[in-house]
Amino acid sequence: MATAANAATVYFQTYTNGDCSGTITTTFQGPNGGGNTCHQFGGQSYGAFYQVISGATCVFKSWENSDCSGLATTRSVLPYTGPDGDGSPPCQSIANDNSGNFHVPNGLRSVSITCS
């Protein structure tokens, strides 16, 4: 029996630099709807703050193309309260793989989010 995906309220902000110091390309906050939803970025992105505000653990899969296709990197994100409870998520170099190696040289243009 298949289980339904959980809805979660998510927040993300993407940047032109991998250390989140460049121009902001996208800001989004809202419900994910429980499914695998594709969100487009406003331009080439290399860094992001990904946060689950409420709900389940979510996987943010960042994609090379604006239609959630091409090369991708993934980040599993738990509901976050911050190191001091301040709610501030860490910056992530989303063009790098989980080992820290540069994986998507052309930057990322979309993210699909699945929560469970």
Image (cartoon, rainbow, N blue to C red):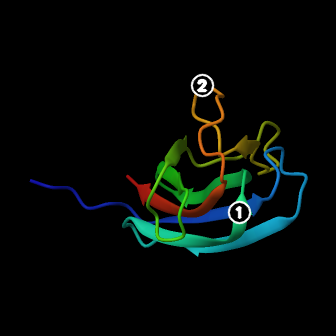
Residue that appears at 36% across and 67% down: 35
Residue that appears at 42% across and 56% down: 115
Residue 27 location in percent, x, y?
A: 73, 71
Residue 11 location in percent, x, y?
A: 66, 64
Horizontal arrangement in the rendering, residue 35 relative to residue 17 (left or right): left
Label 2 is placed on what type of residue?
Answer: Ser
Q: Quadrant of residue 7?
A: bottom left
Q: Nearer the viewer, residue 116 or 68?
A: 68
Residue that appears at 88% across and 64% down: 23
Q: CA distance from mark 2 to mark 1?
A: 21 Å
Q: Secondary structure at mark 2?
A: loop
- The disc at residue 44 is 1
Q: Nearer the viewer, residue 30 or 93?
A: 93
Residue that appears at 49% across and 49% down: 71
| Label whose residue precedes the other's in the sequence (2 or 1) | 1
Q: Is residue 1 above or below residue 98?
A: below
Q: Nearer the viewer, residue 95 or 28?
A: 95
Q: Is residue 3 above or below residue 83?
A: below
Horizontal arrangement in the rendering, residue 41 relative to residue 112 (left or right): right
- The disc at residue 99 is 2
Residue 97 location in percent, x, y?
A: 58, 34
